[in-house]
Image (cartoon, coloured by chain):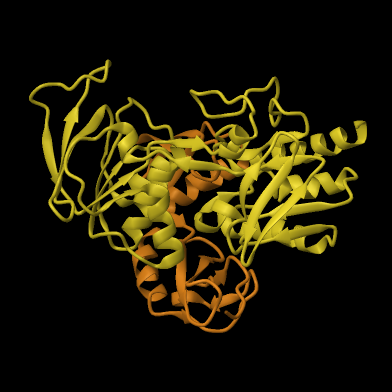
Chain colours: A yellow, B orange
C-alpha cells in the first residue's frame, strides 16, 4: 500500500494493487499488539490500526485499483502477470511491477527437531492468526521454540488467553527480539526464558505430550546430563522468516540462495529492470515503520523508472 | 535501592537505572527521551499496560474484531479485563476507533475497535 501511494505521489497515473486475501493489510491484520507507527505516524498503533490508515489512503485514490482475492500465479521477465480471482484468470502486462510478497515462516522441519509428528505443533505466526483472527486457542500448555519477536509476542498472547506458557527455549545466548518484548511479554507473565537450550525431541502419539530440553555449549553441542522434560500439549515454532520470492524466481531473477532475497546492488531492486521488491520480500525488517519508509522509496523508484523509459 | 529496568515505551528499549524507595522513585538515569523518565516513575508507582485482544463478532465480515484499551490499565487488571472481553459479542458494523465498551471495568478507559468491520 505504501509503494502504491508513493508511486501515485511521484506521478504514476494508473496503479493496480493485487491482494490475495479478502482485506488489505497483509500480516498487520493478525498483529493486534501495539508498537507500530511510532516513527511514521508518531503514535503507538496496533497492526490493524496501522493497516487501516494506509487502506484509507489507498481507497481515497480512484487511480489505485484494488483487486482483492487475487492470487498471482505467473510472472515473466517482460512484466506479464497472470492472476486468479474468483471466477476468472486475468492476464495483464505492466510497465513496472513492485513485489511486496512478504515472508513465510521457517517450520519445525527446517530446524530438524527429532521425535514423533503429533498434533499440536504450530509455526508461531499461524498460531497468531488462529488466536487473533479465528478465536481458536491452540492448546492448554505450551512451549515456545525461539525468542524472536513473534515467539515473544505469542507467549504473551497465549498467556493472556489462559494458556499456561511453560517456557521459551532459545538456542542462542541472547534473544533476537526487542528487549521491550522480553520485558513486557515474558517478565510480566513470569514466563521462563532458557538461553543456550534446544528441544532435543518432541513426544506424543496423537497429541504432543512432552518435549525434551537440553542445554548446549557455544558450538551448539548438547551438554551431557543437562537434559530435562517439560510436559505440554502445544509447541509453537518461532525460528525466523524466509522472504517469499517465488514469482521473482519464476521470472528468472537472480536470488541469493542463502537469504532467499533478490540479488541487486541496492534496496528494492531486482536483477530484472522494472521489477522491484519491497518490504520483507526484499529483506526481513524488525519494524513496520522501516518497511513503510523503504516501500515508499520503491514506489518512487518505480515512478522514476517509468519516467526515464 | 538501585535497580535496572528496560523501558518498554518504544522499540529502542532504553536501559534505565532506577533508584527507588519502595513505590517512591528517587532518581532515574539512562533514558533517551522524556517518555523514559515518565515510564520509570509509573512503573515504580503503579505499572500500567495497554491491553490488545480480539472480540468475537456475529454477522460481520471477520470472525474476530481486534480491540484495544484507549489508554493503559493497571497491570494487575489484565486478566480480569480478558475475562470481561470474553463476555462481549459485536453484532453491528463498526468504524476504526469506535467504542466497543465504554468505561471498561470502571477503569476510566474505553475498549475501542482497531479496524472497521462491515456486515457479512
Residue B57 seen: yes
From the viewer's perspective, tell me whether residue B58 is left or right of residue A188.
Answer: right
Which residue is pictured at 50% across the width and 24% down the height?
Answer: A257
Q: How many marks?
A: 0
Q: Name the image quarter holding residue A169.
A: top left
Percent of width and height locating residue A302: 80, 37
Q: Name the image quarter holding residue A237.
A: top left
Above/below status of B58 relative to B25: below
Above/below status of A167 relative to A163: above
Foreground of the two, A176 or A83: A83
Percent of width and height locating residue A188: 35, 50
Where's the N terminus of chain B, which quadrant? top left
Foreground of the two, A48 or B84: A48
Percent of width and height locating residue A198: 24, 32
The residue most toward the top is: A219
Which residue is pictured at 89% across the width and 50% down the height?
Answer: A13
Q: Name the image quarter holding residue A107.
A: top left
Foreground of the two, A99 or A203: A99
Which residue is pictured at 15% across the width and 21% down the height?
Answer: A223
Residue A32 seen: no
Percent of width and height locating residue A123: 36, 47
Where's the C terminus of chain B, which quadrant? bottom right
Above/below status of A81 relative to A157: above
Above/below status of A100 relative to A110: below
Amino acid at each position: 500500500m505504501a509503494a502504491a501511494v508513493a508511486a501515485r505521489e511521484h506521478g504514476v497515473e494508473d496503479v493496480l494493487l493485487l491482494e490475495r486475501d479478502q482485506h488489505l493489510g497483509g500480516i498487520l491484520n493478525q498483529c493486534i499488539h501495539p508498537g507500530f507507527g511510532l516513527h511514521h505516524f508518531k503514535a503507538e498503533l496496533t497492526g490493524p490500526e496501522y493497516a487501516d490508515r494506509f487502506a484509507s489512503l489507498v481507497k481515497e485514490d480512484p487511480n489505485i485499483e484494488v483487486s482483492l482475492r487475487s492470487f498471482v500465479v505467473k510472472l515473466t521477465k517482460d512484466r506479464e502477470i497472470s492472476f486468479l480471482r474468483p471466477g476468472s484468470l486475468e492476464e495483464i502486462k505492466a510497465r513496472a511491477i513492485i513485489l511486496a510478497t512478504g515472508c513465510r515462516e521457517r517450520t519445525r522441519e527446517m530446524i530438524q527437531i527429532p521425535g514423533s509428528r503429533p498434533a499440536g505443533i504450530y509455526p508461531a505466526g499461524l498460531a497468531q492468526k488462529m488466536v487473533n483472527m479465528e478465536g481458536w486457542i491452540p492448546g492448554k500448555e505450551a512451549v515456545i521454540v525461539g525468542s524472536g519477536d513473534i515467539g515473544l509476542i505469542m507467549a504473551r498472547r497465549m498467556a493472556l488467553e489462559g494458556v499456561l506458557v511453560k517456557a521459551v527455549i532459545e538456542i542462542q545466548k541472547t534473544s533476537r527480539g526487542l528487549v521491550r518484548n522480553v520485558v513486557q511479554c515474558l517478565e510480566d507473565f513470569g514466563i521462563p526464558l532458557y538461553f543456550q537450550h534446544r528441544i532435543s525431541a518432541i513426544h506424543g502419539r496423537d497429541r504432543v505430550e512432552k518435549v525434551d530440553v537440553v542445554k548446549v555449549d557455544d558450538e551448539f553441542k548438547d551438554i551431557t546430563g543437562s537434559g530435562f522434560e517439560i510436559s505440554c500439549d502445544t509447541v509453537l515454532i518461532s525460528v525466523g522468516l524466509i522472504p517469499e520470492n517465488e514469482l521473482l524466481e519464476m521470472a528468472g531473477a537472480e536470488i541469493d540462495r542463502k537469504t532467499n532475497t533478490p540479488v541487486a546492488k541496492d534496496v528494492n531492486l531486482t536483477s530484472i529492470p522494472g521489477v522491484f521488491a519491497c518490504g520483507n520480500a526484499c529483506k526481513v525488517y524488525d519494524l513496520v515503520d522501516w518497511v513503510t519508509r523503504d516501500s515508499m522509496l520503491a514506489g518512487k523508484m518505480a515512478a522514476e523508472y517509468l519516467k526515464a523509459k | 535501592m538501585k535497580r535496572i529496568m528496560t523501558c518498554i515505551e518504544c522499540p529502542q528499549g532504553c536501559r534505565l537505572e532506577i533508584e527507588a524507595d519502595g513505590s517512591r522513585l528517587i532518581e532515574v538515569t539512562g533514558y533517551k527521551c522524556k517518555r523514559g523518565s515518565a515510564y520509570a516513575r509509573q512503573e515504580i508507582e503503579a505499572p500500567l499496560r495497554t491491553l490488545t485482544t480480539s472480540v468475537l463478532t456475529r454477522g460481520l465480515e471477520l470472525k474476530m474484531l481486534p480491540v484495544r484499551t484507549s489508554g493503559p490499565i493497571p497491570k494487575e487488571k489484565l486478566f480480569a479485563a480478558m475475562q470481561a472481553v470474553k463476555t462481549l459479542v459485536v453484532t453491528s458494523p463498526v468504524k476504526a476507533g469506535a467504542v466497543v465498551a465504554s468505561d471498561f471495568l470502571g477503569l476510566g478507559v474505553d475498549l475501542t475497535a482497531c479496524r472497521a468491520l462491515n456486515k457479512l
